Image (cartoon, grey):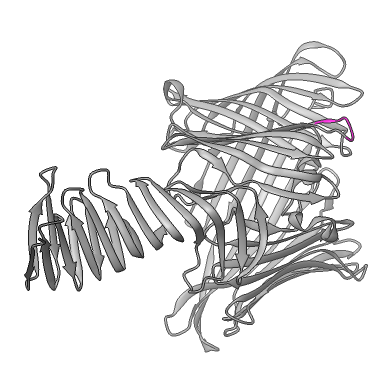
Amino acid sequence: MIFFLCLEFLQDTTLSDTADIVQYEAHRIIYDLEKSRIVLKDSSYITYKDITLYSDSAYYYIDDNILEAFGRCDLRQMNDSIKGNHLKYNIENRKARMMDGKTQIEKGFMKGREIYWVDEQTVNAYAGQYTTCSDSPPHYYFYSPRMKIYLGDMVIARPLVLYIQGLPVLAAPFWFVPISSKRKSGLLPFRVGNSRAYGSYIRDFAYYIVISDYADVTIQLDAMEKKGIMPRLEAVWDFAPFTKGQVYTSYIKEMDTKRERYSIEGRNNSEHFLFGSSFNFDIKYVSDNNYQQSYAETTLLWLEKEITSQATISRDIAGFKNTVVYERRQEFVDTISSTIREKAPSYTLSAPSRTLFSLISYSLAGHFVRDHSRTQTDTSDVVGANLHTSPTMQQNVLDLFTLSPKLDLDLAGYREDTAGNKNQLRFGYSFSATASTNLYRLFNVELLGLHGVLHKVTPRMSYTYTPDFNFGRFPLVAGIPQYSKRNSVGFGVDQEFEAKIGEKREKKRIARISVNGSYNLITDSLSSVGFNVDLPYNPFPKPIANFSTQLDGSINPYTRDYDYNISNTTTIKNDFFSLSLNQSYTRGGIYQIWFSGDIQPTRNWKISYAARYDWETKKLVDYSFGLNRDLHCWEAIFSFNQLGDNWRYDFKIRIKEIPEVAIGRGLLGYILE
């Protein structure tokens, strides 16, 4: 005999075998005592610990600790939820199975014919689909007969098929898709493709290691059929203000050329280093200057003519700043040959600025440097040191003008001069004085939005004297000044025009005009007179967002020959179009145009462009073009760059939320190469 107890009420509780309370609600609750179960009809609601179950109807098997739900089911645990049409949930081991289930995982959505909630961090799906597209049906999804989802980490599928608009596009025997919003150690998605340069390849096969909340390391490997194996390593850390930086290295011994090629780059900033010092470096070593260009796939990298590395450590001791610098400059003659110049090391001691007799400001600095350079055929090594000071005084004379005399003093020693003499000393000095004043006049102008114009005139005159020390026998050493004979008078006038503009009467500079020159007392001759005109004010309304013009030039006062350069920058911008136009014209017919901008004809299309046009050769010297298409959950990107005979393009379609997943030109084989 079966006993039923049917109650028309909404809520009740019962104790499970684990003595935890199960709460439930429904429009109808039936107690089946024979089968030891509770039947919830019509809008059932069950809560147990941290889980909540909504469904059309449900069975609670008390002895087995099983919840079974039918109809529209929604199982929620913590911040996770699985929806489907049939659920079985074991209260004791907290495992669940949902038929035709759907769940949201981080940035994406998962659905499957059967979804098993294995534990709090693991979900298995059969005939599963994963997508980040919120539309129904989605624009794309990954399908796999078997999927394992590690919540907050990744989705592993075997095998995997990518569907776009319901059509299968790509397949792989296995794949994994990162879904974590947090930093976690693990494998990163790699790329498989084919190209003329590399042959068949696997690139960016990497393992990401989270060392702490402030540091991580990525170990990477590229395998290329024609080139060989390229290991790469990248380390990033941020323990500011103690240390913050990154290091990137790569190496390959090319199979086709037999060349060993490498790159080492690193930078660091430490405001608090050892014993109260600061330490910074920015280093770069490469085997040749087209190494990065050879293996870059997305952006066209121009050949670098000079590569600089520098490391600096400094500390203040009793107010004196001590700085040690290592600097390396590598100037490439061609793609392989180069000249290397090093400061190894350079030391500077700087004393704080002081005032003498409340009139004269001065500071003392000491400098030691070893300059080492080497080429393919020669090497040189120069060592020098100096003590330097520049006492300066600034005095107002009768409230008419400001007089600023300055004396430059330098004592230097060299390990060897150009004649081979050892331990040589030399002393040099130079004197200069500048007199200047400021004159003002206000014009009450009410025209074209101007509300008054302030005209400021700054005339100045200077005198410079340096004796003939005949220092030609001393080698050039960075940081040690070279004194040459000079006796001249300089002059100049600066003019500035400021105005209050518009209803808000904002102060803006509308023009600046400068003229300068000098008279050489030794040769009894005038130098060329230089002039500069700067017009930064934009008088035009929108859509012209910027309009500025500069004029630079010089005139020979004897022959009246002159040179000049005119440059202009104009920016036009509105909601769907922008253009930045830079023009430069130099006397003699050298005219070049740079322009860049973007066009957004529709909400989903965007075109970007940049180019330089040489008027003399009547052709584009370099240019780039980009096309971007918003595909809802995807975006399509095309770019093309060219400089001279070097050109490169890239095309890819990638998922916005998972940019590591992309279909690029490498997957399209030789056709686009």
In the image, residue 420 above or below residue 129: above
State how many labels appear: 0
Quadrant of the rendered image containing residue 533: bottom right
Q: Is residue 154 above or below residue 670?
A: above
Nearer-the-camera pick, 429 or 149: 149
Q: Position of residue 218 (x, y in %)?
A: 57, 36
Report whether residue 284 is seen.
Answer: no
> Magenta region: which residues?
256-260
Of residues 130 and 37, the one nearer the viewer is: 37
* Horizontal arrangement in the rendering, residue 118 relative to residue 246 (left or right): left
Residue furthest out toward the front: 1
Pinpoint residue 463: horizontal percent, then vertical percent. 68, 46
* Residue at figure coordinates x 46%, y 69% from the top left: 134
Q: Is residue 626 visible?
A: yes
In the displayed orientation, state which residue is furthest to the bottom.
447
* Percent of width and height locating residue 10: 9, 70
Q: Is residue 258 magenta?
A: yes
Q: Quadrant of residue 515?
A: bottom right
Secondary structure mostly seen in the magenta stretch = loop
Q: Position of residue 232 (x, y in %)?
A: 66, 34
Q: Give yes or no for residue 75 being in the magenta stretch.
A: no
Tell me if residue 69 comes above or below residue 234 in the rendering: below
Report whether 530 appears left or right of 314. Answer: right
Q: Which residue is painted at 84% across and 27% down in the image? A: 472
On-image quarter of the N terminus: bottom left
- Of 632 and 70, nearer the camera is 70
The outermost residue toward the top is 422
Classify the position of the C terminus by image quarter.
bottom right
289 and 100: which is toward the camera: 100
